Amino acid sequence: MSTCASTTPYNSYIAPEDRSDSNAGRIELGAQRTDKNLHRRMGVKPGGPLPDGAYLRTTVVGFKVVKSSPDGGSTWLLSRVAQKAGEIEKEEISYTGTLVASRWEAGDWKLSTKSVLAARQVPEGQRAPKGGDKAFNAAGWTAIRQAS
């Protein structure tokens, strides 16, 4: 492991075996691709300013614990994504699921690829059911309500 990878700020959240210049580079390139795609969807040149009134907001609206133990856990997060390409554009809403897994290590929670791969072996509950709160709750999901 090089000095560069060991000083990257996000490494404080990552399990030691996942820390490398290669992983750091993949994460950085992924972020750059996401930013370029967002700019293109908003109709502007990548790297330039977004149109007035444009936004992308992601809010976690629910979760389902896949596995929980004193030394680790995994959870599906359901997020509502609201995107607007400018002041006079229509807001678009979509939903996305993200699997997050971590383990307790040296007095702190660390994100771990090994933990995510283990959590993916659990076949049920990977998608939030449709049909309202009753189906959502019956499938073991918990809604997160925003304060009004």
Image (cartoon, grey):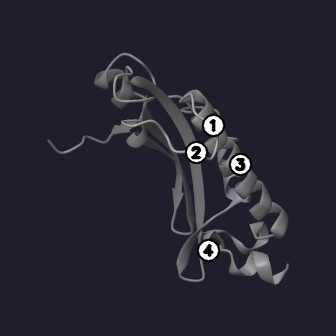
Q: Earlier in the sequence, mark 4 or mark 1?
A: 4
Query: Is 7 above or below relative to 136?
Result: below
Cβ atoms under marks 4 and 2 closer than 8 Å: no
Q: Disc number at residue 89?
A: none
Q: Residue at x 68, y 49 (%)?
A: 32
Image coordinates for residue 112, horizontal then vertical, percent:
68, 61
The residue that disc 3 covers is 30
Cβ atoms under marks 2 and 1 closer than 8 Å: yes
Q: Amino acid at mark 2?
A: Gly
The residue that disc 4 covers is 9
The residue that disc 2 covers is 48
Cβ atoms under marks 1 and 3 closer than 8 Å: no
Q: Residue at x 62, y 31 (%)?
A: 40
Question: Which quadrant: the N terminus?
Answer: bottom right
Q: Amino acid at mark 1?
A: Lys
The residue that disc 1 covers is 45
Q: Earlier in the sequence, mark 2 or mark 3?
A: 3
Q: Residue at x 46, y 25 (%)?
A: 94
Cβ atoms under marks 4 and 3 closer than 8 Å: no
| Residue toward you, 84 or 114 | 84
Image coordinates for residue 41, horizontal then vertical, percent:
58, 28
The residue carrying pointer 1 sits among few (fewer than 14), some (14 to 19) or many (20 or more) residues within 10 Å by Cα, namely some
Q: SS of the residue at dot 4? A: helix
